[in-house]
Amino acid sequence: QSALTQPASVSGSPGQSITISCTGTRSDVGGYNYVSWYQQHPGKAPKVMIYDVTKRPSGVSNRFSGSKSGNTASLTISGLQAEDEADYYCCSYAGSGTSVFGTGTKVTVL
Amino acid sequence: EVQLVESGGVVVQPGGSLRLSCATSGFTFDDYAMRWVRQAPGKGLEWVSLITWDGGSTYYADSVKGRFTISRDNSKNSLYLQMNSLRPEDTALYYCARSYYYMDVWGKGTPVTVSS
């Protein structure tokens, strides 16, 4: 149950696109199409932004999109806005009822 | 409105025990699996435990296996986490979350501090 690997920080200017990677193994990210992404603002509970690799919950902006290739999943934020500044965590099902989160990425809007 | 409200977090000494509760409303509780997730101060999210809709199956992170027990009472729309043999590294904000293979609704969390 080792944490998935994410970059510690990613930054971009308003309007730009950024991508956050989430690297695991074939026992988690690579083995299941059950990767989800969570946004967390300071002092707030996490909010799901993407689930099942590519699906977006109702109410989440279509500026957020997800993908996966092999053992690495990615979250792309297009048209970056000030309100997107937050911490982002990936999470993958890892079999036998277990889940594993990523190390987290701080997104800064310059 | 779907709501999850955690309670029971306090300051406890190492080796002590604690029971967290998560009261739910606004949805059919026994239609869903439920998870506990924790976040140590200034750190990332850590999955702790999962219970199926009927309580028939439970799963734990290696870090808490054998010390924590997840349970639910569908008649009370409530989720629980019994925490025994607590360690300083269990200090965290504990969230309950409604679950599929992902967590779609989260509570605000209840803080647990393990310190002498």
Image (cartoon, coloured by chain):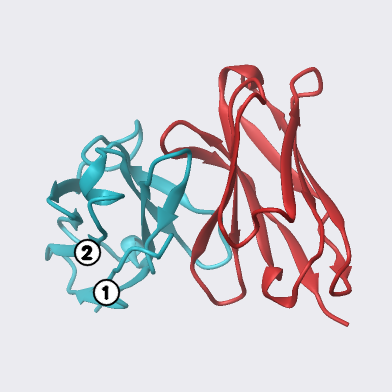
Chain colours: A cyan, B red
User: Quick check: A6 above or below A90?
Assistant: below
Q: Residue at x 49, y 68 (%)?
A: B44
Residue A68 lies, in percent from the top left, at: 15, 48
Tag 1, which chain?
A
Q: Which mark is residue A20?
A: 2
Q: Which residue is mark 1?
A: A7
Q: Nearer the viewer, residue B68 or B98?
A: B68
- The reply to whether discs 2 and 1 touch (Cβ–Cβ < 8 Å) is yes
The first of marks 2 and 1 along the sequence is: 1
Chain containing the residue with disc 2: A
State left or right for residue A42 relative to residue B116: left
Q: In terms of depth relative to the viewer, which is nearer, A35 or A41?
A: A35
Q: Which mark is residue B89?
A: none
- In x, y percent, where is residue A11? 22, 76
Q: Residue at x 32, y 61 (%)?
A: A84
Mark 1 Cα within 10 Å, few/some/many (few <14, many 20+)?
some
Q: Residue at x 52, y 74 (%)?
A: B43
Who is closer to the viewer here, A17 or B15?
B15
Image side of residue B2 versus residue A86, left or right: right
Against A31, residue A73 (above or below) is: below
Tell me the quarter of the image containing the N terminus of chain B: top right
Local secondary structure at mark 1: loop
Q: Residue B33 appears in which quarter of the rendering?
A: top right
